Structure formats: C-alpha cells, structure tokens
Amino acid sequence: MAHKPKDSEVHAYEFIKRNLRLLGWDVRNPERCDTGQVWTQNECLSNPEIKKCLNLDKPENIVKVTERVLWIIEAKRSHSELRRALSEAEDYAKRFAQSDRYDARFVTGVAGNEIDSFLVRSEFFDGSTFIPITLNEIEATGLLPQSQLELMLKNGIADIAEPEIDEGLFISRAEHINEILHLGAVNPHQRAGVMAALLLSMLSGTPPNIDERRPDILIGDINSRVDSILKDQGKPEFYDYIRIRLPSTVDNHAKLRRALVDTLQELNNLNIRSAMNSGADWLGAFYEVFLKYASWAQDLGIVLTPRHLTRWVADVMDIQITDTIYDPTCGTGGFLVAAFDYVKRRASPSQLARFKRLSVFGIEQEAGVAALAVVNMIFRGDGKNNIQEGDCFKKFLIPHTESGLPTARYAQTLSGNPPVTKVMMNPPFALKRDAEKEFRFIDQALGQIQHGGLLFSVLPYPAMVKPGQYLTWRRDSLLANHTLCAVVTFPVDMFYPVGVTTVGVFIRKGIPHPIEQNVLWVRTLTDGLLKSKGKRLPTDRTTNELYDSSDLIRTFLTNPSCSVPNIQMRQKACPIDFSDKLLELVPENHLDQAQPSMEETQQGIEQVVRDAVAFLIRFGKEE
C-alpha cells in the first residue's frame, strides 16, 4: 500500500523568509552581512554565542530584533503541530537565559505547508512567562514587522493598540490576492464580493475550516458564516450579493478552493482580524484594487474616493456627534467610514454608539457595491447601519425620533424640514454624454440638508467651467439658492489611474450667494502620495499641500471673514467674478499670478519669435 508522502518543512522556510522580506526585515545572514537580521537553520550555529546556548540544536530561524533581543521561529509540517512548534520555540528561547549577550524575548510557531496553507502564532516573554501577542486585542496570525516588536519591548506588554497599518503593504497584498482570484477563475466583477465574504467569515473566533478538501463544503462553511452575520446585523438582503458561488464548471471547483485558501492565508499574514478593529479604512483600499478591474464599475462612472481624501474632508468639516451625515452616492462607504472614525477619536463609547445608530446615512445605486459598504461598517461595529441600496432620486430623508432621540428615516417624498446637517459625497462622473450630470446629485443632496447645513462634493473640473447645462446650474441653481464657501483644486493624480482633474466644493445650504461674499479659492498640487508601480502610495518624498490647507479651510467655513494670506497661484479669499460670462468657479480663475520678471519676459518673447520662425520655415513661407 502506497504511503502518502509527507510535506517538507522546506516549504515553511520559504514561507517565513518571503513574509519577513515583505515586512521589511533584512533576511540575510548577520554573520555574512552587517545589516543582516535572519539566521536560517545551520546559519544559527555560525554564531559562537548562539551555538553555545543551543549546542547542536537549531530552530528554523532566529531573527535579530535588536543587537541583544532575538526572535525564535520554529516550523512544523502540519496544522495539527502548531502547538508543538510554539512549545519548541519557547524551549529554544529559554536556553538564552544564561547568555550575557542575547535575550530571546519573542517566539513564533509556524505549522503547515503550501497545500494546506500555514498557521502562525507568536508570543512575547514579559520576564516571567510567554504571553500570546495580540494587536487590538486580537491574536496575531502573521509574522510581525520590526517596529511592532520594538514597541512591545518598549512598553513591556504583548498587545499593541491601533498598530500603524502599512498602506503600501496592504495594497500590494490586495494586488496579489487579485492575481490569486484570477487564477481561481473568479470573474473580475465578483472579486470584491468574494473578498467581503471571506472577511466576514473571519469575524468569529473560529476561522473557516481550510483543511476541508471538498470545495462545496468549504464554500458552504464560508457562506453560512456570512449569512449568520448579516442576519444578526439586520442586513440579510445583502447576502446574495456577497455569497460565494460554486463554479458551474466542475474543473474549476478545485481551482476556486485553492484560491480561497490562498486568499485566507494572505489575510492571515496581514493580521487582518486585528486590522478589522482599527480606525484605518484599509478595507476601502482593498476594494479600490478589486473594483478597478471590474469594467462595470468604470462604465457606471464609479470612481472610488481615495481614503486620504475622505479623511481630509471629515477633518475639514469637523464632524460632530450631533451631526447627521448623509452620502447619497456612498459607494463602498469611504466618506461614512471617515466620519465615523473622526467621531470615534473624540467621543465616549455611549456617544459613538448613538452616532453610528442614528446619524450615519448612505444610499448606493449598485447593490453589490452597497453590500461592500455594509461590510465596511460591520467591521466598525456598525452592522445595523442606515446604508441602503437604491436610487437616491427616489429616496429621501425625513425627520424621525427613536427612543426619544432625533434621527432620520427614508421616505418616498421630500420633507419641508430636512434632517441632515452635513453631506460628504463623490457623485458618479458623467463619462458619457447621456449620463446623469453630477450637479443633479448635488441638488438632490441639498434637498435633504437643514437650512445653513454644509455640503462637500467632489466634482470633475469641467463641471465648474463648462458652458451650457453646467453654466445654467452654477448661475440659476447653485448661486441663486445657496452660498459657495470654498473651492479646492485637487492634485492631478488624485484619482489615478482614472485620468480626471477634480475639484472639491463646499456649499452652505439655503442662503443665496451674496455678491460681495468672499469665497476661499485653494489650489493644491501635492497630497503626500506619489505613483509607484501603478499605485499611488504615501511617501515623505513629496509635500502634502492638501493637508497643509486643512486648518485654513476649517476656519474659513466657520468664519468667512477671517484673514486669509494671499499666496500667488496657491490660495486667496475674494468674491466671485460675476463679470465672467462663463462664471468659471475654479481657483485658477481667481488666484493672483506672479508678475513675470524682465528676464522671463525677454525669454518668452524670444521663444515666441523662435516658434513663429520655425512655423514659417516648416511650411515654406519664409520671405
């Protein structure tokens, strides 16, 4: 009878090194490279002090966290041996107790193989015992970066609250997961939903049974968890948009199972359950990666709002626990998440509970995208939210009370006493001639806002300069009925890879724009991100003019009479130029430009002459 071949621990070596490298560790041998941090197997014994402590025994890896502190990693072939791997790592660490040079304070057990995936558990030695490492009070399921281990050493505890999330790492892993799902024969427009289902399935204390080899049973396990959570949160109607479907072609069943297991592995590597408890909108960044490959999203003009922009808007608008927030085109919920997180940092638990239950409203026309927004809010403990799928032109918010507290509810007709205090939105861009114009969404949202309430909207630059319908709207609807408070031109790459120049407009509801009223005009060229390998990522290699403008805009929205430094081609407070027949409501039409120097003027004249001569020569018309 043939024996089933045993899996090799070599797979674990590759897994460990690959993930350490992704986390920024220098995986070279410290004995051969001054900056190296990782000894592997026999390399451990090349260090005399380590050899003295271990004799001839050697773990899979020893990582140099600091010049004194070590991290022991031990691996086994199967999931069932995880506890044994961790126990052996502890035993290795204890052998350094008598060392004058090294102190082994961290241990990790890795168990599994490339077929079944890998399980990872880590512990911190606090001086008396080994304690499981947790992030946001959730046990870590992946290897850890050096910064987190150093923070635990500094604080002397095994938990890190609100660990910093490496957005670049999350986005790169999302791109890799997209490749995994592609190989698993998952259609591009289904990938964001599959991701949502897998994440929901991980919310419980026990993860899906990835050891299950039958694809139908594994998918059934995942879907039953999704169904249970959505029902518990009062959102069962979104189940059909999130549940994972078994491919109709039997040949693809095993491929899909492999893709699901590999994706769960990647999520565990990112310590995703702890990230679910964080304030960062990492999930929005994930969705951006998957939806950009879905052609239907682009056809509908869905342009996801960058996470750093939603945070900036929530900060500038200074969202309060007393506000009622609305986004009639909420997409995956970026603005609503930003409002929630802004309030969370400033509210008591009871205030936050009231805010998320009574004050956050959103509509999304695409049911699949609305489902993603619901999932996004569930991770913030806000599953019973007021996000709905539907047509924002046919649903309206009217005042309501719940347990004696003021709130809002959806209705089929407008109210004469609208309940919303602040709107944050990014309407679908009118990419086709017959598409719904962006300003119609703004008018609809303004109808839900209280007199004197504030609206922010992203708009394509042409909406504020084009003639025709757009000019009529600016003159006869916007300025005739409301006050334009501020306009900000965003950096040209803000919505990369979508090639569209955008502005942000701040509008005060219900007060016809006074002719002499100052408007704050701001032009930003940088936002702290740069393009890298097809993505835009935060970097210290550029400035952040967007965030530099935050305090000024926040102050101006409250007090339009405040003093505003006039910076040429950057910012200015001045009235609208109503003599402009096109009524171009953009900063570039109102900002002061620097007077050219004599040298610049001379150079400009010479360039014009050269261009003119070159033109004449080209067409053989020289005299």
Image (cartoon, rainbow, N blue to C red):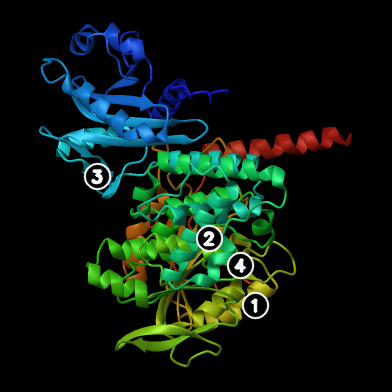
Q: Secondary structure at mark 4?
A: loop
Tell me the SS state at disc 1.
helix
Residue at 62%, 77% in the rendered image: 473
Q: Which residue is mark 3?
A: 160
State the residue at coordinates (22%, 67%).
348
Q: Is residue 520 left or right of residue 496?
A: left
Instruction: Confirm whether residue 593 shows in the render.
Output: no
Name the quarter where the C terminus is drawn: top right
Which numbered disc, 1 or 3, marks the residue closer to the eye? Answer: 3
Q: Pinpoint residue 362: horizontal percent, then vertical percent.
A: 48, 72
Q: Which label sits on residue 366?
A: 4
Q: Which residue is mark 2?
A: 503
Instruction: Tell me the distance, in whole angstroms, between the alpha carbons under discs 1 and 2.
Output: 19 Å
Q: Mark 2 Cα within 10 Å, few/some/many (few <14, many 20+)?
A: many
In primary-sequence order, the first of circles 1 and 3 is 3
Q: How far is the residue under mark 1 from the one under mark 4? A: 29 Å
For label 1, the residue is 472
| Lower position in the chain sequence, tag 1 or tag 4 | 4
Report the quarter where the N terminus lies.
Answer: top right
Separation of disc 1 and disc 3 at Cα? 55 Å
Nearest the eye: 142 or 447: 142
